[in-house]
Amino acid sequence: MSNTIALYPLSNFTFRQDRFTKEAQPEEDPSVSARLQRLQNNYEDFGMRRTVEGILVVHDHGHPHILMLQIANAFFKLPGDYLKPGEDEIEGLKRRLDERLAPPPGIQFDQLPTSSTHHEHNNNSNDWEIGDCLAQWWRPNFETFMYPFIPAHITKPKECKKLFVVQMPERKVLAVPKNMKLLAIPLFELYDNAARYGPQLSAIPHLLSRYNFIYQ
Amino acid sequence: MSNTIALYPLSNFTFRQDRFTKEAQPEEDPSVSARLQRLQNNYEDFGMRRTVEGILVVHDHGHPHILMLQIANAFFKLPGDYLKPGEDEIEGLKRRLDERLAPPPGIQFDQLPTSSTHHEHNNNSNDWEIGDCLAQWWRPNFETFMYPFIPAHITKPKECKKLFVVQMPERKVLAVPKNMKLLAIPLFELYDNAARYGPQLSAIPHLLSRYNFIYQ
């Protein structure tokens, strides 16, 4: 496990939300209770849900920023989602990152305002460089609460969410679903701010603190 | 970097505070302002202070607990302290852990109520197994605030504190300074409890969440 991460400037990354953009990606469930009910239904069929999310880090003026999706001008989330039953977690995270953020496959690179040397970063799927698993969050019951440990007396958690750091390439075009925004949130904004970002996102500065960042 | 940590039961560890105990280890500085003043004086002579602390994890009934020192029935801290100028951080952490928690060298193992096969764990110094660095905390100014990142525009932090996970042996005798208590605090007590434990200790559940614990 490396202790350093190279960070590239936010300005090297293009967030597209125009004719190249993917369609909207609405929530699969119409409500929290519907989501928990589906979790329960799936649990009966497939066991514990496994979810993977990516911590994509860039820098702006020498301070680390995390790329986060904002939905409906309200809540924030990391790119990623649950895995298929039996799916490898690294391959599944790459698939989920592509789903959320990769430009649609039909887009030609010459339509994109980047140099041809970076073509491979624009269109190929699965070119995500997945790094260390930095955290696991456990859902003990079919309820909204999750914890960064398995609570005592819980033998069958209902969901495990793993957060992986993603080493961003030097530059990349990201396509954002129509109903979302992709924002770069500085660590100092997340830190000690569970009120706004919730316990999972506000803990990201802690999880990253072990790394020495190299600002490119 | 391994993703698993073997945890041994709290009952395998003996906390001694009797005739084998070390003397009291009072704070080096009589007040917070004196401590910050000494930090400033030392900064002028030696540069940034480097501090190392150990996260010693055991389990009780299958839930992870962190060994913490409590001073004067009030505040909690991890074992560890600042390094000498130029001192290696791993060697320095071992020295600091010995200072705080190792039985004094004169103690014969047959005075200790453990089997002779564990003699080497009782008396030898430097038998600590230091694991991964899990967090870094930075002090930007000669003030009490620390952050898990270097704040923007800070080019010369005044202190960097690194937290290392320590792989505990199967059993061990720990000698506790007379003015301190050694307590095993469960993760669920630390979690979301900055009000009681402060930002550094309450973040430990996040830092450890990436590991899968093997309960021995």
Image (cartoon, coloured by chain):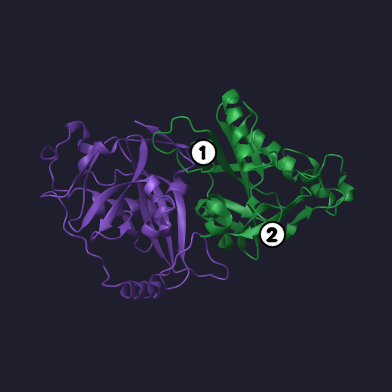
Chain colours: A purple, B green
Q: Name the residue under label 2.
A: B9
Residue extending furthest toward the top: B45
User: Which secondary structure, mark 2?
Assistant: loop
Q: Which residue appears at 58% of the width and 62% of the height?
A: B189
Q: Does residue B130 appear left or right of residue A133 in this picture? A: right
> Residue A110 at what x, y percent from top left?
11, 37
Residue A111, disc: none
Marks 2 and 1, how far apart at CA = 35 Å
Image vertical order of residue A73 relative to residue B82, above or below? below
- For badge 2, the amino acid type reads Pro
Image vertical order of residue A35 relative to residue A61, above or below? below
Seen from the viewer's position, the closer of residues A109 and A135 is A135
> Residue B153 at what x, y percent from top left?
39, 34
Q: Mark 2 lies on which chain?
A: B
Instruction: Say whether disc 2 or disc 1 marks the residue closer to the N-terminus.
Output: 2
Q: Which chain carries label 1?
A: B
Q: Does residue B210 appear left or right of residue A195 in this picture? A: right
Q: Mark 1 points at which residue?
A: B139
Q: Residues within 10 Å of mark 1 (few under 14, many from 20)?
A: many
Q: Residues within 10 Å of mark 2 (few under 14, many from 20)?
A: some
Within the image, what quadrant is residue B162 found in? top right
Seen from the viewer's position, the closer of residues A137 and A98 is A137
> Residue B88 at what x, y percent from top left?
62, 30
> Residue A134 at what x, y percent from top left?
45, 49
Q: Does residue A81 appear left or right of residue B32 in this picture? A: left
Image vertical order of residue A5 relative to residue B191, above or below? above
- For badge 1, the amino acid type reads Arg
Q: Which residue appears at 12% of the width and 49% of the height?
A: A18
The residue mark sitting in front, 2 or 1, is 1
